[in-house]
Image (cartoon, grey):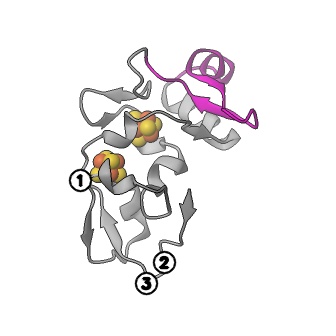
Amino acid sequence: MSEASPLDTATPWYACQRCGNCCRWPGDVRVTDDEITNIATFLDMPRIEFIEQCTRLNANRTGLSIIDKPNGECLFLEGVNVCRIQPVKPVQCEGFPNVWNFPGWREKCEAVEAPRPTDAETLRAKR
Ligand code: SF4
Ligand code: SF4
């Protein structure tokens, strides 16, 4: 995995095309403590219920991740490309592919090179 600052103007900026592919590929969608609280509140669920029903231990056992559906896509993906928790989705989801990505990500992600936004909120517009 590589990480870059979204404010680093020397690197290209990629605009998400809302294909939903990153919600379908395998791996951890990590949630922090604050994100767990925010998502549970958004879903109107008790925090403990959210943890029990919607999360699992992440691969390296250092925290929690959102569980997958049986078909492998994220529990909160609706249809092809709608995130059910869009306003409170984890920072990991917001950051791809501009803040972090991995070798070969271009083969899966349909984001296109675009002028760098000046509005930090643009990250949240993804999906
Ligand atoms: S939380 Fe939303 S944006 Fe993140 S992987 Fe799941 S469906 Fe996609
Ligand atoms: S970040 Fe890439 S893979 Fe994810 S929805 Fe946007 S274009 Fe698709």
Alpha carbon separation for disc pair 2 and 3: 6 Å
Question: What residue is disc 2 on?
Answer: 7
Question: What residue is disc 3 on?
Answer: 9
Q: Position of residue 12 (x, y in %)?
A: 36, 76
Would you say 20 lies left or right of 47 here? left
Q: Amino acid at mark 1?
A: Gln
Would you say 92 lies left or right of 17 here? right
Q: Position of residue 10 (x, y in %)?
A: 43, 85
Q: Which residues are magenta?
A: 44-69
Question: What residue is disc 1 on?
Answer: 17
Q: Is residue 127 visible?
A: no
Q: Is residue 71 visible?
A: yes
Alpha carbon separation for disc pair 2 and 1: 20 Å
- SS at badge 1: loop
Do the residues under discs 2 and 3 have CB atoms within 8 angstroms?
yes
Q: Amino acid at mark 3?
A: Thr
Q: Is mark 3 within 8 Å of ligand 2?
A: no
